[in-house]
Amino acid sequence: MTLDREAVLHIARLARIDLTADEIEMYASQLSDIIGHFDVLNAVDTEGVEPTAHTLPLRNVLAEDTSRPSLPQDEVLEMAPNVEDGYLRVRAVLE
């Protein structure tokens, strides 16, 4: 497929760029070459090939979410830098 001058100007308008006359000719040639590569892909026989977004099957690599006993509150509070009335004291993030 060969792009003409009008198609290149349309693409330039969509991209909001100004092109000189020389650039229009240069980009028409370059964009036509790029589209030619897609023509090769269109020639590939894909009959019976399921559409897919990934070539490999996806799987969850995270560990199972299992419950387990937590630390006692007193032990956690001993490790905290600031404690107030049995709670962790943190810096205010909203004023």
Image (cartoon, rainbow, N blue to C red):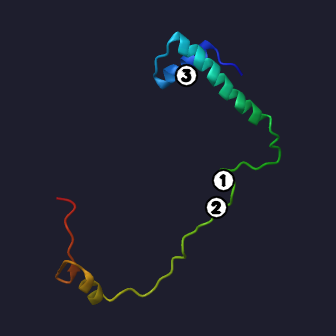
Q: Residue furthest top?
A: 21
Distance in Å between CA atoms under marks 1 and 2? 8 Å
Residue receiving disc 3: 11
Q: Secondary structure at mark 2?
A: loop
Q: Residue at x 72, y 48 (%)?
A: 51
Residue 58's tag is: 2
Q: Residue at x 63, y 65 (%)?
A: 59
Q: Is residue 47 left or right of residue 8?
A: right
- Amino acid carrying label 2: it is Leu
- In which quadrant will I find the C terminus? bottom left
- Amino acid carrying label 3: it is Ile
Distance in Å between CA atoms under marks 1 and 3? 30 Å
Residue receiving disc 1: 54
The location of residue 29, given as percent across then percent down, is 64, 19
Q: Is residue 83 left or right of residue 38?
A: left
Which quadrant of the structure image shows residue 31?
top right
Q: 77 or 48, which lies in front?
A: 77
Q: Earlier in the sequence, mark 1 or mark 3?
A: 3
Q: Residue at x 29, y 88 (%)?
A: 75
Q: Secondary structure at mark 1?
A: loop
Which quadrant of the structure image shows residue 16?
top left
Q: Are marks 1 and 2 in contact (CB under 8 Å)?
A: yes
